[in-house]
Amino acid sequence: MTPQPLSRSSSVIPDHPKASVHFKQVAIIGVGLIGGSLGMILKRNALADSIVGVGRRIENLKTAVELGAIDRYVSDAKDGVRGADLVILATPVDTYERHVKEWGACLAPGTIVSDVGSVKGALVEQAERLLPNSVRFVGAHPIAGKEKTGVAAGSVTLFKGARCILTPTKRTDPQALQAIRALWETAGATVLTMDPMLHDKVLGAVSHLPHIAAFALINALTEVQQTTPELDLLAYSGGGLRDTTRIAGSSPEMWRDIFLWNRDNLVAQIDVYERHLQQLKRLIQAGDGPAIEQELERAKKVREQLNRPA
């Protein structure tokens, strides 16, 4: 079934029948948690004859070989992508331009390039502009992860039950889109298709903004700690603080880039968040118990929806 064009307001394409997919050589650039887990899945399901890892840290790449995420590794990305019919870009999003400029011209006609980045809009446009016309790009965002980074934290079950959003444009090749859809379905993900710009607005709200809140809360607690140096505040914390700030343990490098590449959406959403913080602050200052309870009850009802099956 050929995917239908997306309107700007469209978010999900109807379900497609699952298809099989196989690649002769896959190059994974950035063999960390996401890239490494995808490599494990490719090998476990015999979806590729050969998997080449490309990265900066040799020890991590050696671990990737030992864990069965890749067959071999190289440090030169040009060597890694030569002969590949699929290239997965799994590095911080701010590195995409440098990578594509470095090795894009080395790709054979028909090669599929995809990514796993949490930001899509401008980056999808950039990739389509920089890659040769004969190369097929498909933006992808698996919504799965852990606070831990590196291939050692990878797992063949990382994407099981998770959503993976594909972000095609008018330039996206339908067959390449179907191949990437099949790859992520084999990984156990529920695959949706969304406009790249809409993706950034949605994920900015439900993923990027919560990370900002978690990082800011930990930094605020660090400042509060300075007012009581005789006590270790964190030693008195319970599950509430751990649950609320769990994602503050994520990679600063990765999230720095995500925040910057989705800055317009995030600044607007931070403004909304700040208004709600200020509202609670005013009610607490005024000692208005009924209004505080009303605010909390409204939030509680929305939060309970997260426990329902998608």
Image (spheres, rainbow, N blue to C red):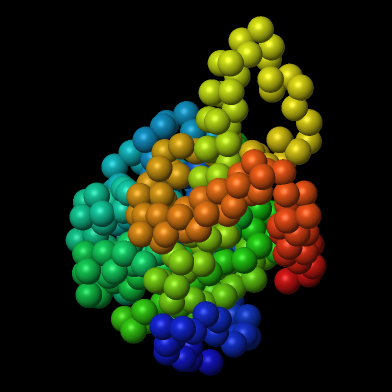
Q: Which residue is more in the foreground, 164 or 113?
A: 164
**Quarter of the view holding residue 296:** bottom right
Location of residue 159 in the rendering, given as x and y in whole percent from the top left corner:
64, 58
Is residue 116 in view from this perspective?
A: no
Residue at 73 percent of width and 62 percent of height:
298
Location of residue 295 in the rendering, given as x and y in whole percent from the top left corner:
71, 57
Residue at 26 percent of width and 64 percent of height:
126
Mark count = 0
Q: Which residue is more in the foreground, 5 or 207?
A: 207
Answer with left or right where residue 208 lies relative to residue 188.
left
Q: Is residue 189 above or below residue 151?
A: below
Answer with left or right where residue 114 lies relative to residue 20.
left
Looking at this view, name the residue that lies furthest to the top: 230
Residue at 44 percent of width and 43 percent of height:
254
Q: Which residue is more in the foreground, 261 or 19?
A: 261
Residue at 31 percent of width and 81 percent of height:
171
Q: Is residue 72 above or below residue 175?
A: above
Is residue 215 in view from this perspective?
A: yes
Answer with left or right where residue 135 lies relative to residue 216.
left
Q: Which residue is more in the foreground, 40 or 298?
A: 298
